[in-house]
Image (cartoon, rainbow, N blue to C red):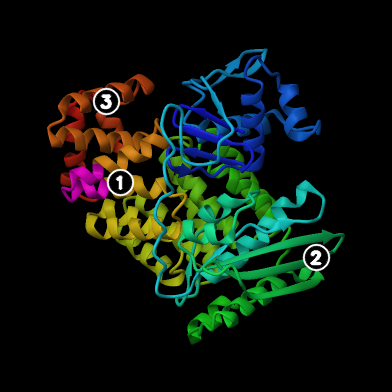
């Protein structure tokens, strides 16, 4: 069954959500929640109904339900403030109130009132071997082990990303296919990856069994396959054996520096992934309360393993965000805490790209642009396949005044993560605006707003581009929409949050917003 509403196509058979022609990343529980609300849209469903349907009656916190509801609204372009599609009825429950059209046709990009659209063109394959790592299947029979299985796939992907001779698709795009039955050739075409790695994990007590297969997406044939078994405490060693076999199967030669960096010995329990991945899922929902919960999850991960670099890096980013968005008022102390996490990560591994990404992001919002640029470039050098590193480095260069390099880096970030790229698109749109390419700035920002209608960064860039193009009434409409949703928004307040190095660049963006009606 497919349900069509607004710009969305919700396919329960293929477990896909599309907005326009874009496939939207959506966790399984969020998908199930949307499915239940849409199927029962003729009446109000209670919290108990949702908990029974999604968690099968298990005891869960109200925060867990709220987090899934917020993620569901974000996925379909709704919000807790607007409630156009999912309405909360105090002390009663929830109801899907948007008009829905049902269809039994084949899955595609069609939306209500529009014809079926053909699939987009396949991405060109890079010259070097390209690979996507799919989430591993959890064969343990315990849903709580999903995080463990995800963690293994993420670790293999992260290790491969450090190798210059490979082109590795980011987790944010390859994990879109979690829980979906897709032809490997279709996945390779959508991601622009020649090879696709899939696997499974079975964990029982202190033993774990892994199987993995590397498949050529052009032919559907196996390039390599193997099984691995060992103690949970030897998890990192098993993951490295998988990665080493993949590198050998693709006939990739590592440089001497990569040999040392990629196969660096690690210590600590892989069970830390449970807290880390829960924190990641909360972080990407991007709201004040989910960031606070993410911070707690990363801190719990570090309580298990104080030297776990991914958690150190993500905690540093979370702390910086809490200052950036005004969620943490003590800027000095919070920035110092973020710096301590980055420094700790570098003490554990001086070649940690994650630490340099965190350091660059934090230094940017401290207005230490030279330090931020240096950290961003170092992160890319250490992990040439990191979509996040290219995105953060592109953002840094944009605010530092090098808009051409900013646009170039954001484009590379989008190629590495072709199915999940809105953050990068927003910063590319701003760079294109400053380069004078107003058509590109307008089109990119408009595309982002099709999926995330309330994104202020995209709205401000679009309004400024429209004004400078001479479309003054459209710019005014956009500004009125912004101020209606954010009554306290002013030009001065928005400007204070943008860490431009040069005042002239800041003025170039803010001046058209003022002329379009944004109050001082």
Q: Residues within 10 Å of mark 3 (few under 14, many from 20)?
A: many
Magenta stretch, main secondary structure, is helix
Q: Quadrant of residue 139?
A: bottom right
Residue designated by label 1: 499
> Is label 3 in a helix, a strand or a loop?
helix
Residue 125: where, in percent of width, then height? 42, 67
Closer to the N terminus: mark 3 or mark 2?
Answer: 2
Residue designated by label 3: 479
Segment colored magenta: 430-441
Near-viewer residue (12 or 413): 12
> Is label 1 in a helix, a strand or a loop?
loop
Residue designated by label 2: 208
Residue 468: where, in percent of width, then height? 14, 36
Q: Residues within 10 Å of mark 1 (few under 14, many from 20)?
A: many
Q: Residues within 10 Å of mark 2 (few under 14, many from 20)?
A: some
Q: Is residue 303 visible?
A: no
Identity of the residue drawn at 52% across and 20% down: 98
Gap between marks 1 and 3 measured at Cα: 21 Å
């Amino acid at each position: 069954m497919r349900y069509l509403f607004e710009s969305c196509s919700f396919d329960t058979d293929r477990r896909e959500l599309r907005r326009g022609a874009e496939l939207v990343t959506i966790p399984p529980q969020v998908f199930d929640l949307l499915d239940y609300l849409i199927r029962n849209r003729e009446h109000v469903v209670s919290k108990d109904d949702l908990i029974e349907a999604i968690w099968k009656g298990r005891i869960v916190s109200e925060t867990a339900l709220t987090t899934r509801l917020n993620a569901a609204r974000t996925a379909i372009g709704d919000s807790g403030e607007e409630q156009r599609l999912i309405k909360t009825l105090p002390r009663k429950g929830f109801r899907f109130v948007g008009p829905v059209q049902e269809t039994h046709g084949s899955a595609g990009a069609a939306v209500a009132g529009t014809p079926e659209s053909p699939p987009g063109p396949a991405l060109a394959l890079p010259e070097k071997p390209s690979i996507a790592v799919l989430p591993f299947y959890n064969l343990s029979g315990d849903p709580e082990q999903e995080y463990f299985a995800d963690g293994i796939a993420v670790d293999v992907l992260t290790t491969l990303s450090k190798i210059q001779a490979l082109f590795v698709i980011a987790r944010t795009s390859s994990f879109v296919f979690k829980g979906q039955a897709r032809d490997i050739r279709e996945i390779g075409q959508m991601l622009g990856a020649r090879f696709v790695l899939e696997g499974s994990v079975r964990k029982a007590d202190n033993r774990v069994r892994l199987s993995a297969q590397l498949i050529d997406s052009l032919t559907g044939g196996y390039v390599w396959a193997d099984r691995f078994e060992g103690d949970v405490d030897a998890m990192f060693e098993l993951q490295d054996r998988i990665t080493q076999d993949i590198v050998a199967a693709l006939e990739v030669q590592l440089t001497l520096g990569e040999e040392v960096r990629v196969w660096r010995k690690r210590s600590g329990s892989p069970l830390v992934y449970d807290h880390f991945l829960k924190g990641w899922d909360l972080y990407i929902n991007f709201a004040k309360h989910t960031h606070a919960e993410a911070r707690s999850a990363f801190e719990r991960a570090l309580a298990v393993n104080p030297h776990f670099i991914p958690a150190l890096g993500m905690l540093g980013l979370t702390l910086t965000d809490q200052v950036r968005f005004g969620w943490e008022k003590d800027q000095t102390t919070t920035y110092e805490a973020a710096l301590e996490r980055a420094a700790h990560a570098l003490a554990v591994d001086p070649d940690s790209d994650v630490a340099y990404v965190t350091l660059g992001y934090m230094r940017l919002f401290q207005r230490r642009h030279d330090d931020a640029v240096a950290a961003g470039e170092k992160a890319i050098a250490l992990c040439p396949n990191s979509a996040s590193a290219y995105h953060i480095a592109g953002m840094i260069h944009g605010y530092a005044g090098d808009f051409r390099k900013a646009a170039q880096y954001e484009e590379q970030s989008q190629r590495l993560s072709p199915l999940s790229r809105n953050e990068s698109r927003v910063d590319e749109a701003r760079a294109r605006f400053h380069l004078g390419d107003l058509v590109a700035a307008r089109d990119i920002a408009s595309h982002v707003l099709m999926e995330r209608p309330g994104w202020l960064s995209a709205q401000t860039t679009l309004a400024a581009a429209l004004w400078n193009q001479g479309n003054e009434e459209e710019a005014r409409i956009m500004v009125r929409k912004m101020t209606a949703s954010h009554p306290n928004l002013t030009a001065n307040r928005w400007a204070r949050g943008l860490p431009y190095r040069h005042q002239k660049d800041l003025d170039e963006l803010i001046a058209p917003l003022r002329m379009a009606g944004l109050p001082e």
